[in-house]
Amino acid sequence: MQHFPIFLDLADRRVVIAGNGEVALAKLRLLLKTVARITVFATEPEADLLDTIAAHGVTLERREAVAEDLTGTALAYAAHGEAEADARFARAARAAGVLLNAVDNLEASDFITPAIVDRDPVTVAIGTEGASPVLARSIKTDLEERLPQGLGALARAGKLFRARAEALPYGRARRDFWADYYFNTGPEVLAEAGEELLDHALEALLAQHLAAEQEPGRVDLVGAGPGNPDLMTLKARRLLDQADVIVHDRLVPQAILELARREAIFVAVGKEGFGPSTPQSEINAHMIRHALDGHRVVRLKGGDASVFGRLDEETAALTEAGIDWSVTPGITAASAAAAAIGASLTRRTRNSELRLMTAQDIEGYAEQDWRALARPGSVAAIYMGKRAARFVQGRLLMHGADGLTPVTLVENASRPDQRIVASRLDRLSSDMTDAGFSGPVITLFGLAPSKAAAALPDLIEDFA
Ligand code: SAH
């Protein structure tokens, strides 16, 4: 995004347009919709421009502007339709430190004017950074058809009522009230009784919503998948969309959090690598407090909520607090990593058993049934195995595993920054160190990238 959209307050601010003809007139018409004080600099204003200036009491200066004229101006438009005159005006604006738009000249402009759908106070601004004015116009046409003309009136009345609506608890209750107003009651009243009665209708609607019984809060424990928004379940998307509060692991990337409502409260918990971690009791307390406040809480966990996610501790705490909860599964990192290397986690005649194991538990490195794992054909997906690589390698070799057993390391599986390192048991520790991973890594013991995936050399780093 080279151009950042904002809504500028033009109350008591001056806007200057420089130009004599049609181009200046078009900008003047647009800016007359605002509350800005407008000055037009025109050496030889054409008749139409003069008419509009006179009709709206716009200030006219019949000369070229110099920098001193522009001090304190909010926005300046070079609208001569002629390059040299525009360039002179642009220099004056620059010298005065004023933001400039040179009409139809993206390079020379500090800002661009979007295509606007105007249902004041609801305005939609559409920009393509100059890529396609045709596209911007066609989006505008679509929206003009979709947004009812009465929307402005609804929003004006709604805005005045905002403070009153705070009588409803924050979150779903308030959201339901506004949805009812904007999509049902409001449009009906507007069509049948007119704008003056909207305020009355809002009062009645508020009383009705206050009287309605409040649904209690709840917690949905949701697997967010390995980090790629495309790999979330539809149910996870829907729950995220409805959530008032999202308590999320640090493993859940921004691309997924952005799918939630903007007004939602976000609470980041959990731990980052070996950094500081939020105690489980505190995570539970966050969930319980928000649910008791009547909020819909989503406890968003990386991968699948039931794999190395301390799920039972959280559900037990919720049950004890009398809070309703549910679990939504997600794609676990092992599945995402296997997909990344195009390999199957199980295979007839090779392994009829798959281990999801952690190399790390609260006491330190985790002991396993190494002897079973050391047998040929064993496959394991090792979570949280970055630091423990040396330990795992040592234990397996000690229990008789073949040093040539394939091991594949997948960092950031399914994400744009995914990396795959094809390794072997006897090099596991050194390859892990050399790779210098900074993201989450899963170690696929007993699996090599498939031929198809191995044919994509960019994808695979082989330290052999
Ligand atoms: N519940 C999660 C696992 C949480 S434990 C799941 O089902 O995937 C955290 C570990 O998961 C990390 O240390 C790493 O080993 C693994 N992990 C999670 N997301 C990953 C990803 N996108 N790529 C690689 N490993 C990942």
Image: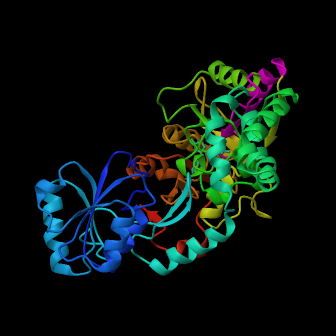
Residue at 13 percent of width and 71 percent of height: 88
In magenta, the rendered stretch is 293-322
Residue 19 left/right relative to 298: left
- Residue nearest the observer in this picture, 52 or 282: 52
Q: Which quadrant of the view contains residue 357? A: top right
> How is this picture coloured?
rainbow
Q: Position of residue 106 (x, y in %)?
A: 30, 72
- Can residue 121 be seen here? The reply is yes
Relative to residue 60, is residue 453 depicted above or below?
below
The answer to whether residue 306 shows anywhere in this view is no
Q: Residue at x 75, y 26 (%)?
A: 291
How many marks can you see?
0
Q: Is residue 116 left or right of residue 196?
A: left
* Residue at the (26%, 72%) spot, across then down: 107
- Residue 36 coordinates in the image, percent (x, y): 37, 53
Which picture quadrant has residue 230? Answer: bottom right
Quarter of the image with the C terminus is bottom left
User: Residue 44, image x and y in percent?
Assistant: 20, 77
In the rendered image, which quarter contains the N terminus? bottom left
Along the line of sight, the residue nearer the viewer: 217 or 278: 217
Q: Quadrant for residue 306, please give it.
A: top right
Left of 10 or right of it: where is 373?
right
- The percent coordinates of residue 296 (x first, y second) are 75, 34
Give whichever of 218, 414 is nearer the camera. 218
Question: Which image quarter has ligand 1?
Answer: top right
Q: Is residue 197 left or right of residue 16?
A: right
On screen, residue 410 above or below 87: above
Along the line of sight, which residue is nearer the eye, 50 or 351?
Answer: 50
Q: Is residue 320 magenta?
A: yes
Q: Is residue 119 magenta?
A: no
